[in-house]
Image (tube, helix red, strand yellow):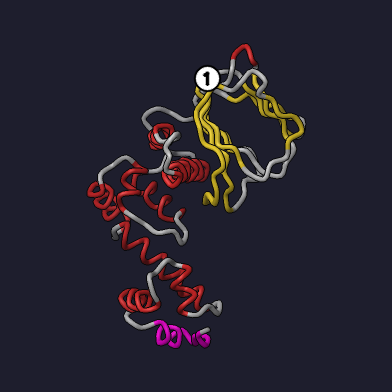
Amino acid sequence: MMIQNLYLASESIAPADWCYHGLYSYFSRLYFIIDGDAYYKEMGKKIRLKKNHLYLTPVTREFDLYHDPDHSLLHTYAHVVTAPAVHSLVEIEVREGTPLFDAVSLWRRHILAQNKELQISTAQLVISLMQAHMRTGEPPSIAEQIKEYLNGLGTNPFHMKDLALALGYTREHLTRVFLGAFGSTPRQYYNARRMDLAVRKLQDGATIKEVALDLGFSSDHAFSKAFRAHFGLPPQKHLLKLGEKLPISK
């Protein structure tokens, strides 16, 4: 699940009149509850938002969201559009000493940053770890956290400094851990995913120029050079080897 857009991000005490009834939303709310009494209600079911828990709300579903003004909600939050969209409420306890706890701490540390990309990358890490926790029931290892981060980038550019900042470890440590777990460096894994995506785009009829632009290469030549370095053949010959051919350039 990848964040496509972020509208609001902050950490605050909700005002006394914080109350929404019969609300429909096209974005999800990512909440970390620090203190207070608040409630989420949908389809006749009311849930109390618990301290030290993360919540990710679904979209396009009617819901109520409110708190007890005598015990105001203190929370860290972000309003995000994700792909795919969230279709059911997610609730996960954040336990101290786990990777998810570290990710939430990092997210909170940068929640008021002026750099929106930093806000998005830290929120993305939290959501990725929530997904991993839902799949396994256990917090993921550092290597799995790196993989979740890389898989969440899509066609966005990758920089080791951003990964180190998002996970809170040195570049050298992250490279060593990932290499030991998966037999490649984070950069190699990212490049392999990008080249596999390039092949799929070419197979779907995109031109070299279109693929180079979509994947963030500086030029057609730079893309073709990277493609050949990875597969050992230029795009045209690699697709012919797969029994296909490139479309005519536009």
What's drawn in magenta, residue-wise?
235-249
| In front of the other: 47 or 187 | 187
* Tally of numbered tags: 1
Amino acid type for the residue under numbered disc 1 = Asp
| In front of the other: 221 or 141 | 221
Q: Which residue is mark 1?
A: 35
Tell me, yes or no, if residue 174 can be seen here.
Answer: yes
Residue at point 49% right, 87% down? 245
| Residue 215 highlighted magenta (yes or no) | no
Residue 142 x/y as whole percent: 34, 44
Q: Quadrant of residue 119?
A: top left
| Residue 184 higher or lower than 229, as above or below | above
| Residue 205 higher or lower than 53, as above or below | below
Residue at point 32% right, 57% down? 186
| Residue 69 higher or lower than 153, as above or below | above
Residue 176 x/y as whole percent: 24, 51
Other residues around mark 1 within 10 Å, as few (<14) / some (14–19) / many (≥20) = some
Residue 58 x/y as whole percent: 65, 41
Residue 149 x/y as whole percent: 41, 50
Q: Quadrant of residue 45?
A: top right
| Residue 200 higher or lower than 69, as above or below | below
| Residue 240 highlighted magenta (yes or no) | yes
Residue at point 64% right, 15% down? 69
- Most distant residue in the front direction: 114
Q: Going by the image, does 185 lie left or right of 111?
A: left
* SS class, disc 1: strand
